[in-house]
Structures are given as C-alpha cells and as structure tokens.
Amino acid sequence: TIETTGRGLIDFVGKYKSLTALPQPEFEKFQIRDLFDKLQTLLSEEVDSNAIDLEFNSSPDTLELTADINLLEKVLINLIKNAFQALEKSRDGKVRVSAFKNIGNNVTITVKDNGSGISPNIMDDIFIPFYTTKNNGSGIGLSLSRQIMRLHSGTITVDSIPNTETVFSLVF
C-alpha cells in the first residue's frame, strides 16, 4: 500500500511539474503546411491501425505563423489523439485539421472530429488541471494546451455536439 501510494504521489508530482514548468516559447516564422506534414508522418501508424481518416488542410497552402513550433506540435498532437480516442467506437472516424485566417485576420487552427463529443455538463471542466473522464487519463493535456496558447497570447476554445462533432479552435 505504501509503495503504491508513493508511486502515485511521484506520478502526481511529475505531472504537476510538467504543468508548471513550461519553457518560454521560442518564436519563429514557419509555414503551417510544414508542421502539418510532420504531424501526418508522426501519426501515420496510429491512423492506419485505427482506420481513421485524418486530413490536414491549410488555406492558403503557404499560410505562415510565428509561434514556437515545438510547443504547438504538442498541443496539436494532444488534440488529435483526444479526437482519436473519441472515435474509438466509430466506424466512420474522421479528423480534420485546418488552418486559415479568420474574419479578424487571426491565424486559426481547428481540430474537428465526428466522435462521441463532450457532454455540455462537463464542457467548463475540461481545461481544469487533472480533470479527466478517461480511465487512464492524467487530466493535464488540455490544461497544458491552454497554458501553451496563453504563452502565445492566443486562445483555445471548444464547441461540441455529442455524437455529431467536436471542434477545438486555436486562435493566434
């Protein structure tokens, strides 16, 4: 019991540290298409093994962003993997990652899936550190994503219609 409790505390402290010890962003200008190509490669095996339709689109194809590409990659991987998990019971799983300039001329990246969605009664809780609905979840992914977006002076929001679609939007 002591050993199990000790491991649990060590795990908690490690997760808490990762939440509070984010590095300052190293901003650089890059084409979003390059980031999307890297993500496509990193996630290809998981896409194939889960029979998920993953699509990336940047409009225009040469759309650029000034951000920390490594931190943004972590955010997008977290959002895409969450989408994959939401599609576990789906036969026609689709994830669409899109980049464009919104009406206010801000670069926006969306991650949209047609999975199980997020219940309205927990929508306000999903960005709270350590809140999770998953059996093996840590509850730090979305909280960490929000912190990374704040470091970029950006926002992360979510809209969800359960069992229809969920859209996470990153606005820079």
Image (spheres, helix red, strand yellow):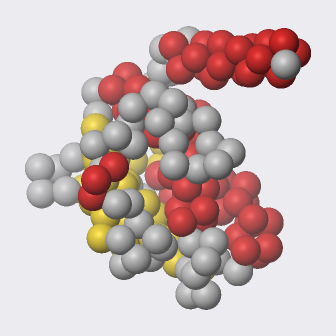
Q: Residue furthest left?
A: 104
**Residue at point 51%, 30% (across, down):** 130
Please tell me which residue lies in front, 111 or 131.
131
**Residue at point 58%, 17% (across, down):** 16
**Where 20 falls versus 81 (above or below)?**
above
Q: Residue furthest bottom?
A: 91
**Residue at point 77%, 17% (across, down):** 5
In this rendering, the count of numbered labels is: 0
**Where 88 falls versus 143 (above or below)?**
below
Q: Residue furthest front?
A: 1
Q: Quadrant of the N terminus?
A: top right
What is the x, y in percent for residue 93? 56, 80
Q: Quadrant of the C terminus?
A: top left
Can you tell which quarter of the image residue 160 is in?
Answer: bottom left
**Where 140 falls versus 79 (above or below)?**
above
Q: Is residue 102 left or right of residue 21?
A: left
What is the x, y in percent for residue 26? 50, 21
Q: Is residue 82 left or right of residue 50?
A: left
Task: Please say whether residue 45 is visible from this viewpoint.
Answer: yes
Please tell me which residue lies in front, 138 or 6.
6
Task: Please say whether residue 28 is visible from this viewpoint.
Answer: no
